[in-house]
Structures are given as C-alpha cells and as structure tokens.
Image (cartoon, helix red, strand yellow):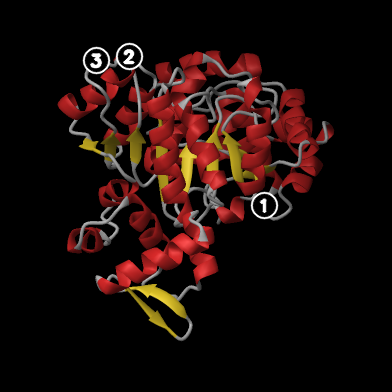
Amino acid sequence: MNATVIRMLDDDGLLPMATRLRPDVDPEETVARVAWSVLVEPGDGVAGALITQHGPARALEMAVGESGLLVPGSLEPRQLSEAQARWRPRAQSRAVLDAMESCLAVGGRLLLPGDDLWPAGLDDLDEHAPLVLWARGDLDRCIGRRTASIVGARAATAYGESVAAELAGDLAASGVVIISGGAYGIDGAAHRAALGAGGTTMAFLAGGIDRAYPVGHQQLFDRIRAGGAVLSEVPCGSAPTKWRFLQRNRLIAAAGAATVVVEAGWRSGSLNTAGHAAALGRPLGAVPGPISSAASAGCHRLLREYDAVCVTSAQEVRELWDDGVDEVAASAPVSPGQVRLLDAVSTRTPREVNEIARLSGLAESRVRSLLGLLGLDGLVVQGDDGWRRTS
C-alpha cells in the first residue's frame, strides 16, 4: 500500500482499531482485508484474483491507487478498470473504520483465511472464496468436525420441516455440525433441531452479523450463537440483497462435507446451493416428496437431472461422505430409534447410558431397551466403562 494510503488510514485510527480487532495479525493486513470486505460484493472474482496474485495490501493499492499500478501478468487492463469503477465509490476509510467498530460493538470477531477457525472448505472456492468472515458465537465448537449443509424452501410444508428436523437432529446428536442459511422454513427447522439435540449449528447470513434477517428469527440467531456460530462475508450493517443471498449459498455448499436439499420448488434458490455443491464436487442429496407436491418439484429435478442421491434418513446422509458406518446399517435391519442410538455410540470410546441418552435424544429407559436388542444382534457390546459399537 502506498504511503499516502497508509497515512490516511493511520490518521483515521484504522491501524489501532485493527490491532484491537486482531492483535495477532499485522494491522496493515487486517485493514486491507477489511477494506476489501467493504469495497466488493461477495464473490467478486476480479478482487479474488488480484489478492491471490499480489496480496491484500498491494491489491488494495491497485484498486484505489491513481494510475500506473497494473502489474504485468496479472489482470487485463479492461478487467481492472471496470472493477475499479465498481469499487471506488465505496473507497471511504470511514466505512472501513465503521466496519471494525461495529464488529467489536456486537462482540464479533474477524476471521482471515488461514486462521485455525477458518472453515477449510471455503478455500475450494479459489478466487471466489470470501476475503474475510465476520463471526459471532462459539466458533471453537464448529471447526474440525464433520459438517452437513441442509437447505430447502422458505415456504416449506409440514412434511418438509419434519424431515429436515429429523435429519438435522439425528446428525447433530452424533456430533455433525449442521450448516444452513438461517431463513424461514427448512433452514430454521434444521437449525432448531440441531440445537434441540444438544448439537452445533452454523448459519451463513446474506447480511451483517449484527442484524437478524429474517427479523422473526432473532431469538433463533441468539440460540445459534450460544450453540454454534453466525457468519457473514459482508460487514456489520450490510443489508441482505438478492445477489448476496445467491452468493451466500456458495459458502453453505463449500462449508459442508455434503449438501442435502430437503424440499424445494422448481425454481427454488436452494437449487442454487445445490449447483454450487455440484460444481465443487461435494456429495449432493435430495429428499423425495409426493409427486403431486410443487414444494418437492425441485428435489425431483435434482434427482432426475443432476445426479443427486435420494436421501430419506440421517444414515443415508452419512453415506454421502462414505463415513464407514454402512456396514452397521447393512448387518441387520434397524428401527429409527436404533439408528439414533447407534449414531450416539462410539466404536472407540465406551459411553454410559446417560451419555448415550443425551446424545441420541432418547429416554434412558428406551436406551437400555434398545441396547439390549442391539447387543443380541452383535451391534453393540458392554464393557466395564460403558457401551461401545462393534466395528
């Protein structure tokens, strides 16, 4: 970044503010990343390519500098000039300072690529990866664990919400982090079920992390922050727009080890998420519905035209990422209650009945009964320290 830009940022107090926000990072790096978050719309490939080639600070100089800053071998002059025309109206140091102040005011934090808490799957987006993530919640619970993205229609039917809740609850109870978009309908059902099972869930928002959208999910977002995290690539104060919703969907698809569309109309936005998952090579599942239901037409389209896998249970979601538990399902017929219990029993760590009950969401009396039946089938075994699943 040239000296003029640095002096301007320092005079406005941005470097000290950056140190407060990320004391472990070079403040110029933080300022440059935040500035990019303010300048560009999500998924801006020109910005991503520029930053990949030259780093955020040098790329920012190219974006807001005077002239003669184009480095040979980078972008075409026309590409950069068109991008600069998009970015320069937002090139205000006050907006960068506001973004950092607002994040601190709501108890948020700034994630940068390469951080330990950065969702690794997002890096597969290459130049379309987010430049930063603004986050609130308990991020330590979300990283380093298996993830599943569950999405679907806002105008969901009772059938769709019930299936979403069953899938998300069973997966979350066994330690899978449920990812969705915080919207009404399927998203909300998935988040609530994950939390209800004592699990972890993450919501990627199209607007800032300081504002609840939809407003009716304010309490749900509070619960998500307590049992997971709310994240966005746009700064606090940013309003959700149609474009930002569509771009947000790529984050949901990239962050999940698999994506499952529970219910979607023929032109549902959830198909956009499915498209991103397919483009990234992520496993894609779809839940079938009644053939007469317009709410499931999009899922049937995914099954027919996009090679989505038919999904009807949490066990089948696990099969999307080849979790190695197929043998258990194949060895004997199991009921939904038995599946939930098997999900909660580890092959390595013995668990007591009360712990299995907590993880499965079943009553202790029901757990004891099912353990006895599964023990007869050789699927679980009891030791001195508790029950474990046979390999």
Residue drawn 61% across the image and 17% down it: 88
Q: Nearer the viewer, mark 2 or mark 3?
A: 3
Residue 292 is tagged as 3
Which residue is label 1 attached to? 25
First of labels 2, 1 by sequence position? 1
Mark 1 touching mark 3, by CB under 8 A? no
* Residue count near mark 2 (Cα–Cα under 10 Å), binned few <14, some 14–19, many ≥20: few
Looking at the rendered image, the quarter that the C terminus falls into is bottom left
Q: Position of residue 211 (x, y in %)?
A: 68, 26
Residue type highlighted by circle 3:
Ser
Q: Position of residue 183 (x, y in %)?
A: 53, 25
Please say if 324 is above or below 50: below
Query: Label 2, label 1: how many angstroms apart (C-alpha)?
Result: 43 Å
Q: Is residue 100 left or right of residue 376?
A: right
Point out the residue furthest to the bottom here.
384
Q: In this view, does 275 lie to the left or right of 140?
A: left
Q: In this view, does 197 lie to the left or right of 264?
A: right
SS label for mark 3? loop
Please say if 108 is above or below 342: above
SS label for mark 1? loop
First of labels 2, 3 by sequence position? 2
Q: Position of residue 264 (x, y in %)?
A: 34, 22
SS label for mark 2? loop
Residue drawn 69% across the image and 55% down it: 24
Query: Label 2, label 3: how many angstroms apart (C-alpha)?
Result: 16 Å
